[in-house]
Amino acid sequence: MAGIYIHIPFCTRKCAYCDFVSVRPDGLKSPYLDALVREIRLRSEMFAGSLIHTIYFGGGTPSLLEPSELEYIADALVRNYRLSSDIEWTIECNPGTIDAGALRAYRDIGFNRLSIGVQSFFDEDLVFLTRMHDGREALEAIEAASTAGFKNIGIDLMFRIPGQPLERWQANLERAVSLRLPHISCYSLTTESRTPLVQWIESGEVMLPSEEEDAHLYTLAYRFLTGRGYQRYEISNFAQPGFECRHNISYWDHEPYGGFGPSAHSYFEGSRSWNTTDVSEYIRLLAAGTLPSQGSETLSSAALRTEHIFLSLRTRGIDLDAFQKKFDGDFLEENASTIERLMHAGFIEISERFVRLTLRGMLLCDEICSELR
């Protein structure tokens, strides 16, 4: 199974916590779209023999594009790649940038899944995060999506926001479930270098909740959502059965994918490559007929094994039989003493030939993965 990621690097304003590649669209839309379509065409040989099962438009804010501009990109994909008949087409949207008319146009283009960047239904949280929408617009976006006929709708919610009491986080979860949303992603607010949030923290203007509070908020979300029929299929992602994001699963399963746009990554046959992060340079290179690659690496067997352990533990767990076939090694035997210690501490469990993180282990996933090989 192969997937395609399309990066739309436009935002009207950059959020204080975000370090994704994004710029204002002023005067850049047309040259950027032409460059993007040119890259789609130039890279098509990479997947000449592959059937594309998922396409994901991320950003930035893809919903800042007009439906006709999105269709221009979609047409290039249809012309240059073999698409599965049951393909998953996702587009990220921000409240305040979509209405029922635009969403109906998205459906006509081929999109069948929405990821809406709600973050919170409360204005106090949204003001701190410097989001462009308010709680009312978040609810209106979800209602518009339903009116337009979308069934596969996911939202992002954020916790560990300074000043956000536990009761408000609980209320966010309750509101999301009451709206019968089939997919809910719960992300802890993290610090990324060179962002205003980091500057606020370093100056003492803002203090993040402690790691203990962070763990408590995640635990609340896990128990609340799994208790209401949602399945955790990745540490931060919860879905009703059948509504998991197939595109993200393909990343976690080390399936091949092509990334188009500035900063986008591709993975194919054990090699990973990435594009320049500079939007202007991206446009200039493709206007000259040159691919905008910034670098590449061929993953060693050891690197693939490390990534497999990390990604598997974040998701459904390590399939011991599959691990044996893929790496010609006995995971339990080679990590015997570490596994015994982690099991005794209540961080992992073994059942049905799978090694899985417990809820307690999910809170320390990165540290646990660093101990296994």
Image (cartoon, grey):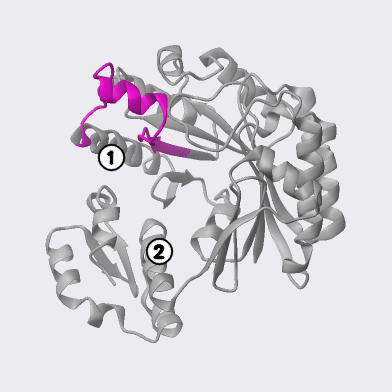
Q: At 85% from the left edge and 41% from the top edge, which residue is drawn?
A: 72
Residue 171 versus residue 39 in the image, above or below: above
| Closer to us: 57 or 296 | 296
Residue 183 versus residue 10 in the image, above or below: below
Q: Which residues are magenta?
A: 185-211
Q: Is residue 231 left or right of residue 360?
A: right
Q: Residues within 10 Å of mark 2 (few under 14, many from 20)?
A: many
Contact between labelled residues 2 and 1, with CB atoms less than 8 Å apart? no
Q: Give the spatial CA distance, label 1 vs label 2.
A: 20 Å
Q: Position of residue 324 (x, y in %)?
A: 39, 83
Sequence-wise first label, 1 or 2: 1
Q: Quadrant of residue 230?
A: top left
Q: Helix, strand or loop at disc 2?
A: helix
Residue labelled with disc 1: 219
| Closer to us: 371 or 191 | 191
- The answer to whether any part of residue 10 appears in the image is yes
Q: Position of residue 181 (x, y in %)?
A: 55, 34
Q: Quadrant of residue 48?
A: bottom right
Looking at the image, which residue sits at the far bottom? 328
| Closer to us: 365 or 274 | 274
Q: Residues within 10 Å of mark 1 (few under 14, many from 20)?
A: some
Residue 272 versus residue 194 in the image, above or below: below
Q: Position of residue 201 (x, y in %)?
A: 28, 24
Q: At 63% from the left edge and 31% from the top edge, which residue is drawn?
A: 61
Q: Position of residue 233 (x, y in %)?
A: 44, 53
- Is residue 21 one of those drawn in magenta? no
**Looking at the figure, which quarter contains the N terminus?**
bottom right
Q: At 37% from the left edge and 64% from the top edge, which residue is drawn?
A: 317
Task: Please name the amino acid that badge 1 sits on.
Answer: Thr
Task: Say which mark, if any, is on residue 312.
Answer: 2
